[in-house]
Image (cartoon, coloured by chain):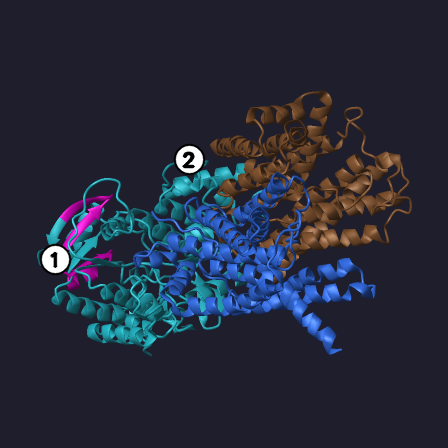
């Protein structure tokens, strides 16, 4: 009995880890006032870049760094769009997803010569996987503290509540927002790294499977706090693990796969309206 | 007027610029690549017909997305609504043996109702629980695909087929071809009629007035007695219905059965189409045609110049990304 | 202390913002010595953050990478005591009343040790007693050597407290005076460039009961004015009454957000609110009738430019408000609910709006007016009540009460 529980527990952590990273990335961006729908694309970008770099260099740790960098770059792109060009953040995020997912599919053919999936590449191994899992939980705590007690954290929160107040105080809220998104993208990228070379050792088209959107739901559940979002991510990870475990039981696999999404919908109906997003969330800031 | 052209101009610039770079990266000559693209899409009657098929497939969900945008709502779930529409048309159509002039309208309505219900559900969640429709429509996309996958893999699976799909529809229920031996059917004129109807709805009717008011000035609309919840359900319902009808036309006109692969992401690309068309139904027709060229030409480009066709997705994503600053979107949306 | 006066739209806030550095000028030069602080008309505070976080934003005391909260609290407390502006450093701004929030904003500026302090309409949302307190503080600051510039349109305050006055009109400076050597009327004259426009006269009416809501009673042929400081429940009252009388003429507080669709034409905006009744034929929107109604409003209210199809966002605030009021009065409703009907508009437009409201009253309309501007209450109301802390006080006929008493009621006296 306990062996099965242990397996479920471990699987929960494994399934939850990419969600935690993505959700933390979402929280940081949103607290600064930028809605990040592009988490899915950042996951995919990080996942693919890691596999491509691992393939070319043979070094999994280097590949992991590359994946993080890719996520950070995508975050930067979204940040610039949201601040300098003042585009609608939600639509831009959707565009980013298409862009990143399409770009990964495109580069897949370029790098590996065939569509659909890459070859197996050097991965992070069991030790690497465990490190990333632990790191995710540590990151949750660290980000929570950073937002609460550091100067930068205060600036991020101010950028999300009233960017003009921050501007008056002599700090550029646009710069802060871009910084927050770069950090957020890096985190999501790390989540993607875990997906491709942490849990497995390859990249396949569509492997992100909507996790970026579940992470968004986790951000909302968690009331835009790092610890709350992590808890929500663990909750969803549990459902994903459950689906995997119950595969043999005759329950249609599609139903099990749909569980996290149904749970997210139910919770959005239940929780929504009570939590409040940062006041300037989603509103582009304009210097006159 | 100028806004519409600016969007189109920017989009064209992105396609040309980014497309060229990507083609170079793939080791192809951009001029050759674009030649293959346009030649493949417009070169002869058959190819033009296929381009129009893609245009139609994009036009339905794009019109739906645009309606939602005009109401200040983000319908990212057109893909799922399309699937539900196709599922309804395919599963009912498989067992319906009525003459075409009865069955086709019936099945199109079924598709619209299924898609509309799917969209209205997201609208209901927004109206009643203030649930963010971006997330709910995204979630419902996945649920729709999984649900449809389950049904055609099991209960609705055609006994005659090995793949997971419904039985082939009786010929009476197939949409009549417009050009022989192509996939271009009555779906195109139907889509054009829908576009005209929407233009009229938005500009001339009281419903359109209220919908636009909610989209452009939600607080003022509320004070004017327009219930935001009612509009959310109606707008997302209408949006889903149009996308659902689009899914039905794919089943009735192209595949003649339903399987879950009926859409290569039309619902997402439709967002780009709606933006390039400035959320105006007539301009969207032109935008859909432009994207139809991209979609159809990409295959030829892949075969002829060796450029992987996913470049089209990249370009479309970039277009959405850059055009996200359209006038309907830069106001603060009440959430 | 130096006052910068001018009517709404004259350019005072713009000038101040440019001087402060919040806005970038298109032409011209600015000479600055030392730091400048600006207390905004609509405070720029992060409401969900704490007082100390707002005051010390950007200058937080740090130990290594974390903020030293103790030191932060101490700094705020010290600053507060030095200037006589009591606040709780740890309170969340959103829980504070308006006058205290203003203190936080002031402290934020004082923290930077400014040589010049600009205040944009600081008394717009204060009760008379709070205004006194503010000016006491400002006088002390002036005595300590800080140059104070107050932007205001409240000439009574200018005459009482300042040493110099600069008058702006239509974006230009038109007069510079020593306060001691001028009169209120002279200043007003310079502000408007002529005589103050007259408001329509009240005629005798025979009020009959129209609406009764808890202790509030509004009668036809009269205007009931609700005075009070912003934030004492007026908005809730407005929303409640608006629900009770659905076919009332409504003039909301924030025209751009709550009354108009800025991208639409004047005609389409005129239809807003009655698109289902007067302006509909079947499922079709009756734009023709909307246009003709718009034309008649443009005439009655002297709206410029006189174009029915112009997007209403291109009109000035005063002209926009004329449309809002004209729409509310269109169709001769029996009840009009007006919330800050002359907020932020120029004197000429304000006079027209107030005149039309009085004319409606003369014709038998029942009007409920909610305003934070005591002057407006006294111009328009037949009977006055004060709202404080969510409670409505008793109604007084206009002749039976004076400003001092109302001022006291506005701060909670009984």
Checking the image for residue B220, the label placed there is: none
Of badges 2 and 1, the one in the foreground is 1
Do the residues bearing badges 2 and 1 touch, measured as CB atoms within 8 Å?
Answer: no
Chain holding disc 1: C
Rendered blue, the chain in question is: A
Tell me: C242 left or right of B58: left
Chain B, colour shown: brown
Q: Position of residue C25 (x, y in %)?
A: 26, 44
Q: Residue drawn at (15%, 54%), measured in percent from left and top? A: C33
Callout 1 secondary element: helix
In-front residue for pair A185/B231: A185
Q: Position of residue A225 (x, y in %)?
A: 50, 67
Q: Position of residue C261 (x, y in %)?
A: 47, 46
Mark 2 or mark 1: name the one nearer the start of the chain: 1
Give a yes or no on whether discs 2 and 1 share a subunit: yes
Q: Residue drawn at (60%, 50%), measured in percent from left and top? A: A51
Q: Residue drawn at (49%, 63%), measured in percent from left and top? A: C239
Range drawn in magenta: C147-175
Q: Quadrant of residue B130?
A: bottom right
Tell me: C9 left or right of B72: left
The residue to which callout 1 is attached is: C179
A211 within the magenta span: no
Tell me: C272 left or right of C185: right
In-front residue for pair C242/A280: A280
Callout 2 secondary element: loop
Rendered cyan, the chain in question is: C
Q: Position of residue C167 (x, y in %)?
A: 18, 50
The residue to which callout 2 is attached is: C307
Residue C107 vertical position relative to residue C276 in the rendered view, above or below:
below
Tell me: B268 left or right of B181: left
């Amino acid at each position: 009995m306990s062996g099965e529980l242990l397996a479920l527990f471990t699987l929960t952590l494994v399934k939850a880890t990419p969600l935690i990273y993505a959700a933390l990335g979402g929280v940081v961006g949103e607290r600064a006032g930028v809605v990040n729908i592009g988490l899915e694309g950042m996951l995919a970008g990080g996942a693919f870049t890691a596999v491509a770099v691992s393939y070319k260099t043979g070094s999994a740790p280097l590949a992991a760094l590359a994946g993080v960098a890719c996520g950070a770059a995508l975050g930067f792109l979204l940040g610039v769009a949201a601040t300098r060009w003042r585009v609608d953040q939600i639509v831009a995020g959707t565009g980013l997803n298409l862009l990143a997912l399409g770009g990964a599919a495109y580069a897949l053919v370029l790098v590996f010569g065939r569509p659909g999936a890459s070859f197996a590449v050097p991965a992070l191994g069991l030790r690497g996987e465990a490190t990333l899992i632990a790191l995710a939980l540590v990151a949750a705590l660290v980000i929570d503290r950073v937002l609460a007690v550091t100067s930068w954290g205060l600036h991020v929160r101010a950028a999300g509540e009233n960017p003009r107040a921050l501007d008056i105080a002599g700090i550029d809220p646009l710069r802060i927002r871009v910084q927050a998104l770069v950090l957020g993208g890096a985190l999501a990228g790390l989540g993607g790294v875990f997906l491709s070379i942490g849990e497995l050792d390859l990249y396949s088209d569509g492997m992100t499977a909507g996790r970026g959107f579940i992470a968004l739901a986790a951000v909302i559940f968690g009331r835009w706090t790092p610890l709350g979002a992590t808890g929500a991510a663990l909750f969803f990870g549990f459902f994903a693990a459950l689906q995997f475990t119950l595969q043999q039981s005759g329950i249609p696999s599609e139903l099990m796969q749909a569980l996290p999404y149904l749970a997210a919908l139910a919770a959005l109906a239940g929780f929504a309206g009570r939590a409040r997003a940062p006041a300037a969330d989603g509103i582009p800031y304009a210097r006159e | 007027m100028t806004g519409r052209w600016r969007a189109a101009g920017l989009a064209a610039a992105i396609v040309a610029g980014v497309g060229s770079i990507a083609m170079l990266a793939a080791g192809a000559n951009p001029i050759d690549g674009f030649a293959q693209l346009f030649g493949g899409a417009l070169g002869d009657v058959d190819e033009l017909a296929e381009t129009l098929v893609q245009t139609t497939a994009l036009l339905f969900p794009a019109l739906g997305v645009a309606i939602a945008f005009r109401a200040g709502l983000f319908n990212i779930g057109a893909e799922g609504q399309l699937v539900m529409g196709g599922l309804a048309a395919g599963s009912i159509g498989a067992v319906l043996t009525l003459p075409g002039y009865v069955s086709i309208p019936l099945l199109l309505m079924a598709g619209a109702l299924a898609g509309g219900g799917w969209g209205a559900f997201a609208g209901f969640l927004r109206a009643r629980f203030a649930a963010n429709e971006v997330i709910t429509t995204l979630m419902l996309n996945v649920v729709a695909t999984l649900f449809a996958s389950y049904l055609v893999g099991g209960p609705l699976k055609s006994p005659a087929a090995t793949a997971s799909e419904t039985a082939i529809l009786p010929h009476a229920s197939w949409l009549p071809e417009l050009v022989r031996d192509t996939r271009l059917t009555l779906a195109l004129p139907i889509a054009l009629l829908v576009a005209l109807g929407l233009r009229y709805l938005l500009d001339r009717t009281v419903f359109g007035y209220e919908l636009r008011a909610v989209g452009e000035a939600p607080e003022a609309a509320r004070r004017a007695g327009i219930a935001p919840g009612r509009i959310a359900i109606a707008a997302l319902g209408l949006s889903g219905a149009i996308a659902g009808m689009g899914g039905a036309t794919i089943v009735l006109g192209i595949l003649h059965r339903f399987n879950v692969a009926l859409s290569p992401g039309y619902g997402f690309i439709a967002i780009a189409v709606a933006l390039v068309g400035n959320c105006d139904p007539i301009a969207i027709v032109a935008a859909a045609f432009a994207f139809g060229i991209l979609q159809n030409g990409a295959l030829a480009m892949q075969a002829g110049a060796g450029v992987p066709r996913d470049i089209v997705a990249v370009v479309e994503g970039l277009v959405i990304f850059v055009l996200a600053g359209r006038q309907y979107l830069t106001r603060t949306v009440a959430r | 202390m130096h006052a910068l006066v001018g009517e709404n739209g004259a350019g005072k806030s713009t000038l101040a913002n440019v001087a402060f550095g919040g806005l970038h000028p298109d032409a011209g030069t600015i000479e600055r010595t030392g730091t400048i602080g600006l207390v905004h008309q609509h405070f720029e505070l992060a409401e969900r953050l704490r007082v100390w976080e707002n005051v010390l934003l950007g200058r937080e005391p740090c130990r290594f990478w974390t903020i030293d909260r103790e030191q932060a609290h101490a700094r705020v407390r010290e600053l507060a005591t030095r200037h006589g502006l009591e606040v709780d450093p740890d309170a969340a701004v959103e829980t504070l009343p308006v006058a205290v929030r203003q203190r936080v904003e002031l402290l934020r500026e004082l923290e930077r040790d400014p040589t010049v302090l600009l205040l944009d309409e600081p008394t717009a949302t204060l009760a008379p007693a709070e205004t006194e307190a503010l000016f006491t503080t400002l006088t002390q600051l002036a005595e300590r050597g800080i140059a104070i510039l107050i932007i205001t349109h409240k000439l009574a305050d200018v005459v009482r407290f300042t040493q110099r006055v600069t008058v702006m009109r239509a974006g230009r400076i038109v007069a510079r005076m020593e306060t001691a050597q001028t009169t209120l009327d002279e200043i007003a004259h310079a502000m408007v460039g002529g005589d103050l426009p007259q408001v329509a006269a009240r005629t005798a009416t025979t009020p009959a009961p129209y609406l009764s809501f808890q202790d509030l009673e509004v009668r036809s042929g009269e205007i009931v004015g609700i005075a009070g400081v912003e934030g004492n429940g007026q908005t809730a009252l407005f929303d409640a009454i608006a629900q009770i009388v659905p076919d009332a003429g409504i003039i909301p507080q924030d025209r751009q957000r709550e009354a108009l669709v800025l991208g639409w034409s004047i005609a389409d905006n005129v239809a807003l609110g009655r698109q289902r009744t007067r302006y509909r034929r079947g499922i079709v929107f009756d734009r023709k009738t909307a246009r003709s109604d718009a034309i008649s409003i443009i005439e009655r209210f002297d709206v410029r430019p006189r174009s029915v199809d112009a997007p209403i966002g291109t009109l000035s605030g005063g002209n926009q408000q004329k449309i809002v009021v004209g729409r509310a009065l269109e169709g001769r409703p029996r009840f009009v609910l007006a919330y800050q009907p002359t907020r932020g508009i120029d004197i000429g437009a304000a006079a027209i709006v107030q005149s039309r409201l009085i004319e409606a009253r003369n014709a038998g309309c029942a009007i409920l007016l909610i305003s934070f501007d005591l002057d407006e209450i006294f111009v328009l109301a037949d009977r006055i009540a004060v709202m404080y802390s969510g409670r409505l006080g008793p109604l007084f006929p206009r002749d039976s009460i004076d400003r001092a008493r109302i001022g006291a009621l506005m701060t909670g006296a009984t």
